[in-house]
Image (tube, grey):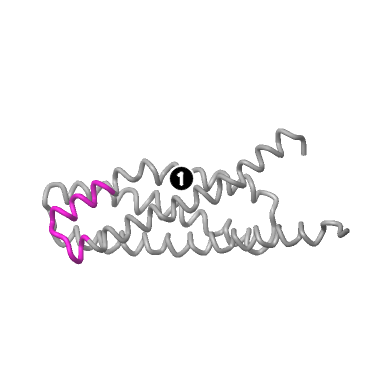
């Protein structure tokens, strides 16, 4: 690996976990804010949270794109169990986010902003909370596996180091 490729690889190794944690914490903030507003807030609070979630997509979507692209780049040649598990989870996380959570964020915000807190709103809100919790769980597993992969790599480097 030449010097430029080594630098790029090192940068990707630093960016990947940062983007992953930003994505995880953003979804966690959306989820907890939604649950709290639904349980203890007024309709105005719920509507404000729905606007915040929609605006927060400007942080979440790029973070998830970065985590996906950097993960594919770093893990393309890896065949170990944690890497395989992460590769299997990522398409589900992405599909859940793009096909369920993102459209629901737009739809629920539009319903909340017009005060349409009907049965459809609450059914879809429950689906959004379940889908969000699912992504949090799967992302948490991927963070755990990524940390294990990093720890394994560091341990191998220490063991390979010549002793004085």
Q: Residue furthest right?
A: 164
On screen, 117 above or below 15? below
Residue 23 horizontal side relative to residue 14, left or right: left
Where residue 51 sits in the image (x, y, percent)? Answer: 23, 46
Circle 1: element type: helix
Specify start and end residues of the magenta stretch as a single range: 37-52
Location of residue 2 by image quarter? top right
Which residue is farthest left?
Answer: 115
| Mark 1, other Cα within 10 Å: few <14 / some 14–19 / many ≥20 | many
Q: Is residue 138 above or below residue 111?
A: below
Q: Is residue 46 magenta?
A: yes
Near-viewer residue (45 or 125): 45
Please provide percent x and percent y for residue 132.
36, 59
- Residue at 13 percent of width and 59 percent of height: 42
Residue 59 position by quadrant? top left
Rendered residue at 41%/63% (across/down): 134
The single residue placed furthest to the front in the displayed view is 164
Q: Which residue bears the numbered disc 1? A: 63
Q: Main secondary structure of the magenta part?
A: helix
Q: Quadrant of the N terminus?
A: top right
- For the residue pair 150 and 94, the one nearer the viewer reads as 150
108 on left or right of 159: left
Q: In the displayed structure, does residue 32 sit left or right of residue 10? A: left
On the image, the x and y values in percent for residue 105 come to: 29, 50
């Amino acid at each position: 690996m030449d010097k430029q490729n080594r630098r790029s690889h090192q940068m990707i190794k630093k960016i990947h976990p940062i983007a992953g944690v930003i994505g995880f914490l953003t979804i966690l903030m959306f989820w907890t804010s939604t649950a709290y507003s639904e349980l203890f807030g007024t309709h105005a609070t719920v509507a404000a949270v729905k606007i915040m979630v929609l605006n927060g997509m400007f942080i979440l979507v790029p973070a998830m794109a970065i985590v996906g692209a950097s993960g594919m780049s770093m893990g393309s040649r890896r065949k170990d169990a944690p890497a395989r598990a992460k590769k299997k989870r990522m398409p589900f996380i992405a599909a859940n986010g793009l096909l369920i959570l993102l459209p629901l964020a737009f739809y629920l915000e539009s319903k909340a902003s017009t005060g349409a807190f009907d049965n459809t709103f609450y059914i879809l809100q429950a689906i959004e909370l379940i889908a969000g919790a699912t992504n949090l769980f799967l992302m948490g597993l991927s963070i755990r596996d990524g940390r294990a992969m990093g720890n394994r790599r560091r341990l191998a480097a220490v063991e390979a180091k010549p002793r004085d």
